[in-house]
Image (spheres, rainbow, N blue to C red):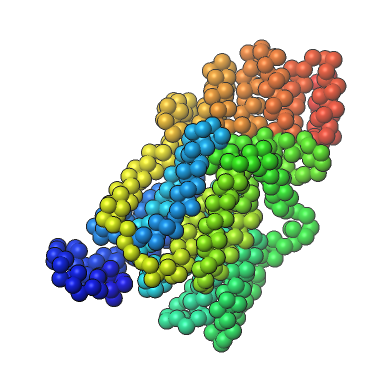
Amino acid sequence: MAAWTGESTDLSRRRLEPLSTEVTSPSAKSQLDVVRLALVCATLVASASAYSAHLTSFLHAKEYALAIGVAALGMLTLITGRVSRVGVLFLIPLLALVIVAVSAGLAGFTTLNRAAAIELLRWSVLALFVLNVFDLLEAERGRRVVSAGIIASAVAVSALALAQFAGLVPVLFPVYEGHAHPLYSVFGNPGLMGGYVALGLPIAFHFASGKTGARFVWMASIVPICAGLAISGTRSAWAAALAGVLFVLAYERLWNRYAAATLLLVLLAVAALVLIAPDQTIGRFESAALGGDSSSSLRFWFWSGAIELIREFPVFGVGPGNFAYHSPEALAHVLHGPGGVQFAHNEVHTLHAHNDFLELAAETGAVGLLLILWWCLRLARCPGPEWGSLIAYAVFAAFYFPTFSSPHALVALILAAVLFARRHDAEAKPAGRAAASLVGLISMAVLGLVVWMVLIPSFEYREALDRHLAKDDPIPAYERLAAHPWAPAGVHEKLGLALLQAGQNEAAETEFKNALISIDTGAVYLGLGVALFQQGKLDEAREVFESCVYRWPSHAYAWELLLRVTPQEDRGKVLERATTWLSREDIARIEKLE
């Protein structure tokens, strides 16, 4: 009990310590720890399940829910006065990574901008969550309860996805016309949903198959988890879940009747889902075999662009959160390089490389990778069944971007903390009241930062976009948001577009140029080129359209506009370049402009 409550076992020391308030008594501490564990589980479920159509990204609602949990945990840390010294040691590589990223940005080696600041804030929220709860993980009871919270969050996400799939709650999940996938789930993305559920399956399998209590509860949790995983239609999530479960089986040597029964339950659940939802299950393999799935082909293009950034910025990278800004030019460089025509590509700007290892290398460089490798080597010495879910995370991260989704990253960080705490539980000591007060105060402060830097701009941006789509005048809303110090990167682009539609070409030009400070996509160059063209600034427009088709080589309208502002003697060369990227129909239509 002493290890759980933090009570001293030294009798002489206990006689010297005053009997303070009830809050600091052993029984009160134990009760507070129960409250803290309940809050940890509630935060896990809330951060995974929260979403809102009134924000520009469902992930913003999750970050807000997580920040609320961190603030509440920070308040309890102030009361308990406990922060684990081992927890601080666990997070040293992340702290070093933040220091390196900020220092490199201040020195001008990387880009230190709004995107970097928000990404560093997200890292801070994740780290503070772990700091506030690490002492709970130093006891087996705490580790089991937190692991159960992870399973509960996976069940909650799966249950909501199944409800949407069955059309049971149209109020919560309305159908949006033109949405690429009918199952957008609480992540706004079926792939992220499937990946999150995959993280919960190995832990649930361990609890259902091992020497644990409430075994049938854990077995029952596997059914909705498998169902959510199946209907996500995400092959990388399936591979991740399989790798994690196989590791748990091999590591724990769970070849017993409970493991056999759990495996049979998994197989029956999957077989039933194949019959109920063939398009989301067996259809995914058929589309890949027949070449009808473009997502796999596009990944090679994304990966090549990330590798190009690594070559260009090998030491410190481009800075946290800046892959989205630098990737358009890198992806264009790949397309226009030797053999680039063979890559499947699109006209949609990618925010992530769909491989977290490459994206982290592009953003943090060799220095960042060495710090992450150091972190992994420290964890490699910490055995435990939690490695099953961490392996699932690594497999999924090779094809998606869970590291940049706070709920996914939180689960991985907590499970890594569980491994580290178990190995070092004999070294469990508090870091001191001053450290606890500092962590508690910062934890409450980050809630305000998340609201100011992320939530309010996201809400106002969504409101402005909705006005724009409804054909109401969105210019005042965009202008008000553009004045916010943490305005989203796309605000100036959308304001420029609205001004262009209103015939205010000169003002639109200014806004598109402002947008280029934080966005480098072909869409911004297209808008800027049109604004210049309509003002008669043909030479400037030609240069801008060249930048546009460099990033969007298959954009037929951009080539058409480029041809319009190109002198007659050079148009043949433009058409010759366009034939590499455009269809015969598009080329025939453009040739009529001659």
From the top left corner, tell me how far across and down residue 155 is, in percent.
48, 67
Work out which residue is located at the far bottom of the displayed protein and give it: 257
Q: Is residue 107 visible?
A: yes
Residue at (69% x, 28% y) in the render: 548
Q: Residue 260's quadrant in the figure? A: bottom right
| Image quadrant occupied by the N terminus | bottom left
Residue 275 lies left or right of residue 342; in this view the side is: left
Residue 15 lies left or right of residue 297; in this view the side is: left
What is the count of numbered marks? Answer: 0
From the top left corner, tell me how far across and down residue 383 is, in percent.
52, 71
In the rendered view, tell whether residue 432 sits above or below residue 584: below
| Image quadrant occupied by the C terminus | top right
Q: Nearer the viewer, residue 132 or 20?
A: 20
Residue at (57% x, 76% y) in the render: 251
Residue at (52% x, 37% y) in the render: 104
Residue at (55% x, 28% y) in the render: 517
In the rendered view, tell whether residue 267 sits above or below residue 442: below
Q: Nearer the viewer, residue 494 or 169?
A: 494
From the top left corner, tell me how far across and down residue 175 is, in percent.
54, 51
Q: Residue 111's quadrant in the figure? A: top right
Work out which residue is located at the far front of the displayed protein and give it: 12
Q: Nearer the viewer, residue 66 or 305?
A: 305
In the rendered view, tell whether residue 120 sits above or below residue 253: above
Q: Nearer the viewer, residue 330 or 366?
A: 366
From the top left corner, tell me how far across and down residue 216 is, in percent.
47, 81
Q: Is residue 197 visible?
A: no
